Image: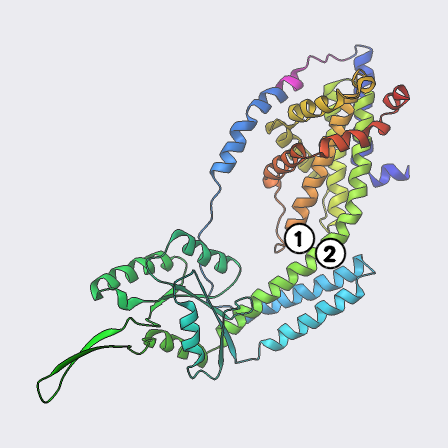
Amino acid sequence: MDIAMKRPILIGGLGLSASLWLLDVVHHIPMDGSLVLSAIALGAAGVWWFRQQTQTLGIPTIPQQTDVQRDAIDTALERADQLIDLMLTEDSQAAAQAEVFRTEHEVLLDSLERSHLTLGITGNKATGKTTLLNALQASEFPSITFTEQCDDADLVMMTIAGDMTASELNQVETLIADGYQVLVVLNKQDQYTPMDKAVVVDRIKERLAMRNVDIVAIAANPNPIKVRRHSASGEVTESLEQPAADLAALTKKLDTFAAEPANLVMATTLRQTQALQRRITQQLNEYRRQKAMPVIEQMQWIAAGTAFANPIATVDLLATAAINGQLVLDLGAIYGQKFSMEQAKAAAGTIAELTVKLGLVELASQALGTVLKSHVTTYIAGGALQGISAAYLTRLAGLTLIDYFEEQSLLEPAELNFDGLGGRLQTLFQQARQGLALKDFVTQALPHLPRVSAAAN
């Protein structure tokens, strides 16, 4: 009675599946296989659906956020503090790590008052980044430190030596996506004629405009120029002279940053606070995964026993849906996601639909059947394949939910949407097929099928 109260979907669903099986045995209801035929039809659409998903993938353009509000930082710091409290509540052994996180939290709060900036320089080879770094380090910016280490930089200056390549543009987008403030520096401008320089700069500006990134043009180490001198006697001499570095556009920009450092400081603090949140959440999710895996294992063996005992595919589907619904409730509770019974049933329906659409039922049966053929006694037992397949698909659903809940926990609180589960199911299944996971799983599953185990002995 206590189990039924704690797991209503599981008990109710398995009871319904057992009742349908008994009714079918005594011919009280027709089982014309229409549900199975529908599953096959949906499976045929799986390849098309997956291709559609992959074709729509792309890297979205993310504009640089140059005006971070203090409210956003306060909210992020408060969220980090809440996560530390949550970690201590769920894992009593995490006190030492929590203290480390709290110290980092206090440092981030204090950093909002600083006025000194750290500017990082990056770029591909032969773009002059080292020369630029040396020139800037020799300049007079007492409130700015220049470095090639960009991890903690308030601004990343990305040097390029010509029109931006696709890889350079991707680097900019990656930096922006990671929360960095970026300034593109076109070096070696002296190698262009004034007209060509204007064309190149305009082209780069056009590419960067939608990303809200500025560009400045400089010459950190201009090419030597030929100088001709005429003496009083009329003699003409020629020599090569090294012009001074032309950093005027960049130093003007740096003066602005030094005079008003608050925007860069707040952007850095927000980025670092969000990184702290992710590390706390990852630590928390490691503990949650340790709690979640036994739940999945319990459910997968329930699925194995149910499918092994009930030879009807329609009944298997009902039982699997009940088990998946209970998985959603149990795993959601571990990961702090509260669901109503109706929401859990809807999520289980989504998982079942995706499993069929992707053709995973048939693929799992084929792959596991191949492995089972090496177990002659086991293979001839009619329900073995159904039982192990049900257990494996249940495990796959559970691991997919863990993956989904862990990703959700890294995001800002929002309404859960299970539409993205298909890609995870596909990825996890392909990973299992490529390794020894299926063979190992069959070995683990056999003892949980009583009649098979007895026959093997």
Residue at 37%, 54% in the rendered image: 165
How many numbered discs sit on the rendered protein? 2
Residue at 78%, 43% in the rendered image: 293
In the displayed structure image, the side of residue 129 where residue 193 appears, left or right: left
Q: Residue 330, how many percent across, how many down?
A: 77, 43
Q: Residue 245, how many percent across, how many down?
A: 33, 76
- Examine the image and state in which quarter residue 17 appears: top right
Q: Which residue is mark 1?
A: 409
Q: Are marks 2 and 1 in contact (CB under 8 Å)?
A: yes
Q: Which residue is mark 2?
A: 284
Q: Does residue 34 show up magenta in the picture?
A: yes
- Examine the image and state in which quarter residue 9 appears: top right
Q: Can residue 69 be seen in the rendering of this structure?
A: no
Lower position in the chain sequence, tag 2 or tag 1: 2
* SS at mark 1 in the image: helix
For the residue pair 158 and 31, the one nearer the viewer reads as: 158
Q: Does residue 409 show up magenta in the picture?
A: no
**Whether residue 424 is situated above or below residue 373 in the rendered picture:** below
Q: Hey, what amino acid is under mark 2?
A: Leu
Q: Hey, what amino acid is under mark 1?
A: Ser
Q: Residue 420, how many percent across, how many down?
A: 59, 41
